[in-house]
Amino acid sequence: MIWDSAIHQSKLVTEQTAERSKTMAITPISGSALQGIRQGMQGLRANAAEIASPRLTGNDFPTKDGVRAMVELHQNTHQTTASLEVFRTHDEIIGSLLDIKA
């Protein structure tokens, strides 16, 4: 569920970024936000692969590695979500500045 939500958000950001990059330059703030999203998604993929690995799925109780991967999965979800919010806020600020200038 968390994984699907993060993937969906990442796809939306990618589509929105591609659309806006035609009209808007990538600023240091949006670049940092995109880097945070990218790093969070890479971490989510790595954690999901580790959780789904055969050495962890056969146990009745979570192993130390399994618990660590689940905690990191949660942390990476927060990183991706926070970076997405930074990107959205930056986009709103730029839009407001353009409205004021127009």
Image (cartoon, rainbow, N blue to C red):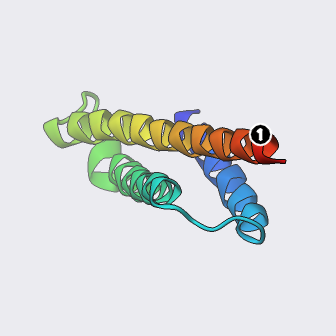
Vertical placement of residue 83 versus 13, above or below: above
The answer to whether residue 82 is left or right of residue 88 is left
The answer to whether residue 4 is left or right of residue 52 is right
Element at badge 1? helix
Decide which of 51, 43 is in the foreground and name it. 43
x and y, in percent, of residue 20 in the image: 75, 62
Q: Residue furthest top?
A: 61
Q: Residue at x 66, y 47 (%)?
A: 94
The answer to whether residue 18 is left or right of residue 74 is right
Vertical placement of residue 3 versus 33, above or below: above
Decide which of 47, 25 is in the foreground and name it. 25
Vertical placement of residue 31 versus 93, above or below: below
Decide which of 91, 13 is in the foreground and name it. 91
Q: Which residue is mark 1?
A: 100
Q: Residue at x 77, y 67 (%)?
A: 23
- Number of marks present in the image shown: 1
x and y, in percent, of residue 102 in the image: 85, 48
Residue 53: image quadrant is bottom left
Q: Residue at x 70, y 64 (%)?
A: 24
Q: Residue furthest left?
A: 64
Quadrant, the N terminus: top right
Residues packed near mark 1 inside 10 Å, few (<14), some (14 to 19) or many (20 plus): few
Q: Residue furthest front?
A: 101
x and y, in percent, of residue 39 in the image: 39, 57
Q: Residue at x 66, y 52 (%)?
A: 13
The answer to whether residue 23 is left or right of residue 35 is right
Three-letter code, disc 1: Ile
Q: Residue furthest right?
A: 102
Vertical placement of residue 89 versus 30, above or below: above
